[in-house]
Amino acid sequence: MAKVSIIIPTYNVEMYLVECMESVVNQTLKDIEIICINDGSTDGSLEILKSYAQKDDRIVLVDKENGGYGIGMNIGLDKATGEYIGIVEPDDFIPLNMYSDLYEKAVENDLDFIKADFYRFKREEDMELVYNHLSPNKEDYNVVFNPSETPEAIRYIMNTWSGIYKRSFIEEFHIRHNETPGASFQDNGFWFQTFVYAKRGMIIDTPYYMNRRDNPNSSVHNKEKVYCMNVEYDHIRELLVRDKEVWERFCPMYWLKKYNNYMGTIKRIGEEYKREYVHRFSEEFKRGLELGELDESVFTKISWDNIQFITKDPNGFYMKKVATPVKVRRLQKKVE
């Protein structure tokens, strides 16, 4: 059994893949399993993965037809044999000591998962690095906590790749990704499940993972995937409501995370989709208010005011908070 199985879900990233693979195969922790899932790439990604697999018998290469991120990740999780599981996105890279450090702390503290701070970066003329803290509170770091009894931990920055997860924990609760074809943001549900079910977690204030923010093909920048976040949060709700106690405990924080991600979606999507999206946003949150599921105390005043505004007057919210000045002038002319 390897100490860590590292899953690399790959689709059309030949520009960045060598840097990623070099950072993984040269980890100071040598007892690793590297599971590369080629999701029907049409560029040179498969050839790059094959060349590494020929030289390194720790690499397990799966070549499949394109089916989406969730399906590929679940294949990787099914194939993993390591004591812990890590995830590296193929346009990112990691420092060489990341998995040795994380594994040592995870074993020492018998953790279901451990997650670390990370960097976001862009490479243009110079390397631009931004340090991201999972939590703004120093007291949250370097201590073992029970995520399943700590709904406030849902406030931590959401990612699945800055840490490692005990495989026996993942298998006990059968934690997997949503497999909706063509969807994005399917790591959100995986992230929620790890926090909802883990009994021993830790976050550490050492940044390892290097998360790219200049890949134009990233789903973060795909303006046409308008409702993928909504689909994912419907999926997360379905997962949580299966257990009444879990849903009651995490329901308010579910709506907080949903709000934050929907607001992010409004910023991300194309201008032509924004008005329609605001109306979908309004209907979903209006329903949540009617069911008594939103808890004002978990939101900032600005966020709560936005929720009141968007549910009562989605057109007004769009005109005042979302539409560009040019768009507003055009809409006003139509009315005139």
Image: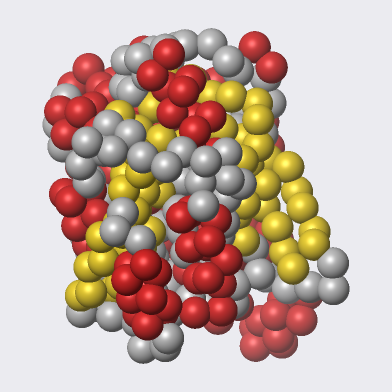
In the picture, residue 106 is in which quadrant? top left
Is residue 278 at all visible to an observer of this figure? no
Which of 33 and 203 lies nearest the eye of the viewer? 33
Is residue 127 at all visible to an observer of this figure? yes
Q: Is residue 178 left or right of residue 128?
A: left
Image quarter in which the C terminus is found? bottom right
In the image, residue 136 above or below residue 66: above
**Residue 325: x %, y % from top left:** 78, 75
In the image, residue 28 above or below residue 26: above
Residue at image position (67%, 52%) is 120
**Residue 294: x %, y % from top left:** 42, 30
Q: How is the image coloured?
A: secondary structure
Residue at image position (73%, 73%) is 324
Looking at the image, which residue sits at the far right?
A: 125
Which of 314 and 125 lies nearest the eye of the viewer? 125
Residue at image position (46%, 23%) is 104
Count of numbered labels shown in the rendering: 0
Image quarter in which the N terminus is found? top left
In the image, residue 225 above or below residue 239: below
**Residue 171: x %, y % from top left:** 17, 34
Which of 197 and 169 lies nearest the eye of the viewer? 169
**Residue 167: x %, y % from top left:** 25, 33
Residue at image position (42%, 72%) is 225
Q: Is residue 177 left or right of residue 120?
A: left
In the image, residue 252 above or below residue 85: above
In the picture, residue 3 is in which quadrant? top left
